[in-house]
Image: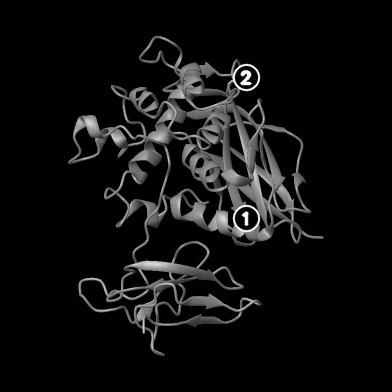
Amino acid sequence: MSTKTVQFRVEVKNMQITSGSFQVFGVVEGYVGAVNNKTSFQNNTFSAEIKENESEYYAVTVWINKYSIDGTAYNVEDRPLSLLATLYLPKTNETVVVSPESSVASIYTFARMTSVDDDGTVHMKGTERNMKIAYGMKQNIYLTEGIIGTMISTSPNGFETNSYPMFNSLCNLYYYCLTNPVSNIGKPFYEQFLDYAWHQPDTSNKNFLQAVRNMLYDPFTNAGNIYQMLVGKEEIYPDSLLSMKNVAEDKKAPNNWTLTLKSNSSGAKNFIPSGAAFVVFDADDNAWIANNFRAGSADSGTHCPVYKYDATPADFSPVQGGGLLGVAFGAAVSPDKKYISFGNFG
């Protein structure tokens, strides 16, 4: 069985990582397990040999032990602090970037299949289908090669909702948990964030990624207090909640830390989704959405958008013709999921 050498690069703004360790895991059911023992690295880069034709989806946990900023050395071995990235092996031809952005994007989109040990080790387990959908959504937030996703950073998201600023705020939370200044109530920043993020009453959060994973169980707990931790601090990752334009200061704090993405393209500029009703899924995980009316008019819709597993329009979307008119709940899929039927309001 052949192997593929995957290159990794750790990127945290303003920092040179001088000492850390990493471990790569297969995450698809039947192939779940460590690719390597926990391995030390220096100077931000490392590589791993991964067997091809096994799991196609992988996750890497990276622990930072020592780093430097402007030549000053820091040691964080007194508290577990890990980063996370996910990759799809068949299409990984460039360096995989491991960063606060990759960590937040991966922990959010793979959350239902993820647990985090007290030492910061991230475990994922799911079907190939689970991973395909989660990875596709992760790419909408942050690409494996280290580029912000188009969907989260542009209209109808970007600065039109708070998800892109919230994403950057979460990255700032990681940065300050790493540098660990005194928080606004006098406790170390790292300790304060772990306290604020939701956790079971009889346990406590032990590391950043565990706290973020737990925060997704209840994103409302201490939402405003978590936001306040960043008030007055430099935006290391810019365009965060703090700098949202045309938003009053007392409206910038979120009431929960849920990241949502909007998609308003059906695949044709003159047929945007409007009045969506019933949804059915085919064998390829395409979502066929009943569409009630044509946006900008009083007419019933004569089109229905179809979205791929990553929420982008299918190549043949939107579906038109065949008597489509104000479909509403008139959508059905055959038992074998190969055939889709639409009715109309008449």
Residue at mark 1? 131
Judged left or right of residue 28, residue 259 is left
The residue sitting at 34% across, 35% down in the picture is 254
Of tags 2 and 1, the one toward the viewer is 2
Residue 1 appears at what percent x and percent y?
82, 60
| Residue 37 sits in quarter | top right
Q: Tell me: residue 120, above or below residue 114.
A: above
Q: Relative to the observer, which residue lies in front, 138 or 309?
A: 309
Alpha carbon distance from label 2 to label 1: 32 Å
Q: Residue 173 at x, y = what percent?
A: 43, 29
Left or right for 220, reference 95: left
| Type of amino acid under label 2 | Asp
* Residue at numbered disc 2: 202
The location of residue 255, given as percent across then percent down, is 35, 34
**Considering only vertical position in the picture, is 66 above or below 281?**
above
Q: Nearer the viewer, residue 334 or 321?
A: 334
| Quadrant into which the C terminus falls | bottom left
Disc 2 packing (10 Å; few <14; some 14–19; many ≥20): few
In the image, residue 148 sits, relative to residue 320, either above or below, namely above
